[in-house]
Image: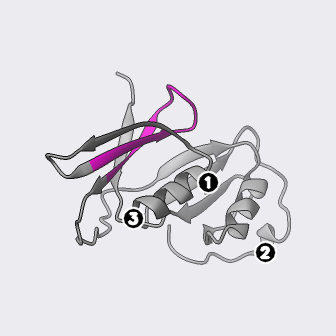
Amino acid sequence: MKFLHTMVRVADVDASLDFYINKLGLIETKRIDVPEGKFTLIFLATEPGGPEVELTHNWGSEEEYTQGRNFGHLAYEVDDIYQLCQKLMDAGVVINRPPRCGHMAFVKSPDGISIELLQKGERLAPQEPWASMENTGTW
């Protein structure tokens, strides 16, 4: 068995692509428009051929997607958790759970999907201002 992708519904394609591509650094690997079904599927990954996130956008839907507890989060391994969190914060992304321990942080997508960031390899030594930051929300 091979993991292929996780699907999340998105309300605003532009805001979602800005978050996943411009802020997190994913790449678009495939896009499928289905006019008869009035939806678009956009597949994103960290690298070609890697596991993907499928963004599903239903055209013209005013439906607000509520958050259920049955979906936890997406997780990505990162080269430098402090550097990425600073980049995200500078881009206006709220760090819901700062990387105080040098190992783990949480942010949210524009649609409220929790994104876990995990430091690659050994945890980094605690650094300020991260070490003394409080959580800013749930993840």
Task: Count the labels in the image.
Answer: 3
Identify the residue under disc 2: 132
Which is the main secondary structure of the residues drawn in magenta?
strand
Identify the residue under disc 3: 12
Where, by quadrant of the figure, is residue 65 drawn?
bottom left
Instruction: Please name which of the two marks, 2 or 1, marks the residue nearer to the observer.
Output: 1
Asked whether 28 or 77 is in front, the reply is: 28
Which residue is outermost to the left?
36
Q: Does residue 102 appear in the picture of this structure?
A: no
Residue 2 percent location from the top left of the image: 38, 24
Callout 3 crowding tier (Cα within 10 Å): few <14, some 14–19, many ≥20: few
Question: Which residues fall within the magenta stretch?
Answer: 40-56
Identify residue type, mark 3: Asp
> Who comes first in sequence, dot 2 or dot 1?
1
- At horizontal 73% and vertical 60% (from top left) the residue drawn is 87
Residue contact between numbered discs 1 and 3, judged by CB atoms under 8 Å: no
11, above or below 6, in the image: below
129, above or below 35, in the image: below
Residue 79 percent location from the top left of the image: 74, 42
- At horizontal 47% and vertical 67% (from top left) the residue drawn is 110
| Distance from the alpha carbon under mark 1 to that under mark 3 | 15 Å
